[in-house]
Image: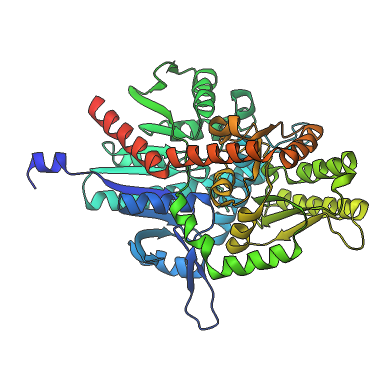
Amino acid sequence: MTGTEERDAPRRLIVAANRGPVSFNDDPSGKPIVTRGAGGLVTVLTAMLRKRPGLWVATAQSDEETRLAARGEAVEVTLEGDTYRVRYVAPDPETYFRYYNIVANPILWFIQHYLWDLGWHPDIRENELLAWREGYVPVNRMVAEAMLDEIAGAGERHVGVVHDYHLYLASSTVRRGAPGVFLQQFVHIPWAQSDYWRILPREMREAVFNGLLANDIVAFHTSHYVDNFLSCCAELLDLEVDLRRRAVLFHDREVWVRAYPVSIDPETLAAPAQDQRVLAEERELLSRRRDYLLVRVDRLDLSKNIVRGFLAFDRFLDLHPEFKERITFLALLQPSREDVEEYVEYRRRVLRTVEQVNTKQGTTDWMPIDLRIQDNFPATLAAYRNYDALMVNAIFDGMNLVAKEGAIVNRRHGVLILSENTGAFEELSAFCVPVNPFDIEEQAQAIHRALTMPTRERRALAEQIRAVVACNSIDKWIAAQFADIEAKLESS
Ligand code: F6P
């Protein structure tokens, strides 16, 4: 290639995330079964790599991925007819445990969702500091080194996009090793206000901010998180911040801070929603259906506010006994982070609350809350198709794709009850029944309002949500990011 050709060639994309595109599940035959990797991030990243091929760096989550990591080079994995190039890194189990189960979850996750009850938690002791130094730091370094290794093979004409809170330190290592590479980091969870970040010891806090500011662009889902991040840069680091241009000056480099609200690809839900397994789940669901169906679909996570949702339902039944025996609250909860103590305790609370509400309100013939702790996408799609109201009452949530998926798949003009602290609220506030996630009284009223809304109004709201989702498509999400990457490259 000549110098000009090389300059004009599109930059090669390298994405890095904690999880890879697929999960390898053990099969008695000995050959692992490949399924889609867990979580919403995997769905949007696979969509991005289908549009813009590149390489994916991920940590190994299974024995098969550990074997693939040992090759020390990218491998090809195929999912639903698409092939992805993935470079796995495999920290030893103790290092990974410290990185994922002590630092990323709960410390960073809890800070960013305001989940610590500060009179009681967290206690940051030697165990947490060790987890940082001997877990979070080395795993980030391993991911960064894999990225650098790939970059070294083809010069610095790359765009590296690092995803989420597991990997806040990776970009600073990549920047040191390849100063000319273009780097973006996408933070998929909320960004807390500055005082709450003071929970994190200075050593960790400075490393998090230095890592993020090693990027050319730092991305969030909403303008509110952009504002919070910019205020943190000014208040915690005393950096020069241009609020109007949403830029931070850091070591003579300008870092742009931008919002790109992520969405879903309606087409990828349309075909599976007609799948035989979904239709079988739907038949089962309809055979049990009462007059009304309230649904929630979440990971079993404290940030999702599951317990308050059940308490609100209990209150709703107290206030409106005419709904007794005529409604089911179907809660589909995916098990999550089961090695983290706070999640284990929360699961117990969820189970206890369901038992209490069902004992208090239920009858021999009727179980008000139907709780299913499972990872079953066909059952989720069947529930999406049939809800009358969908409860999304998260304490805080980066975006919340359930709100968007539900509206696309639903066939009953179902009403969305949406927490004002979700990222999705920036786009959907006018088309939902809004709730304060802490106000159980308001959530009880919201359930009633959603279920008694005239059909014309329900239809109008559902159509408007579908229009927003169709307009703010995943294609638009991807295009907006690459447009800014081009603009930033041109401006520097
Ligand atoms: O919301 C942030 C996020 O990392 C998502 O990308 C993902 O869907 C979810 O959390 C799942 O987390 P975990 O990888 O811990 O299961």
| Image mark count | 0
Q: Which quadrant of the figure has residue 279?
A: bottom right
Q: Is residue 220 above or below residue 355?
A: above
Camera-side residue of 354 and 138:
354
**As drawn, is 34 to the left or to the right of 196?**
left
Picture residue at 74% right of the left edge, 32% below the top: 118
Picture residue at 35% right of the left edge, 32% below the top: 216
Camera-side residue of 30 and 147:
30
Q: Which quadrant of the figure has residue 248?
A: top left
Most extreme residue toward the bottom is 29
Residue 16 in the image: state x and y as whole percent. 41, 49
Residue 441 visible in image:
yes
Camera-side residue of 11 and 324:
324
Picture residue at 69% right of the left edge, 67% below the top: 284
Residue 296 in the image: state x and y as whole percent. 68, 49
Picture residue at 59% right of the left edge, 52% below the top: 411
Name the colouring of the figure.
rainbow
User: Which quadrant holds the C terminus?
Assistant: top left
Q: Is residue 448 above or below residue 249?
A: below
Residue 299 in the image: state x and y as whole percent. 64, 52
Residue 51 in the image: state x and y as whole percent. 32, 50
**As drawn, is 261 to the left or to the right of 354?**
left
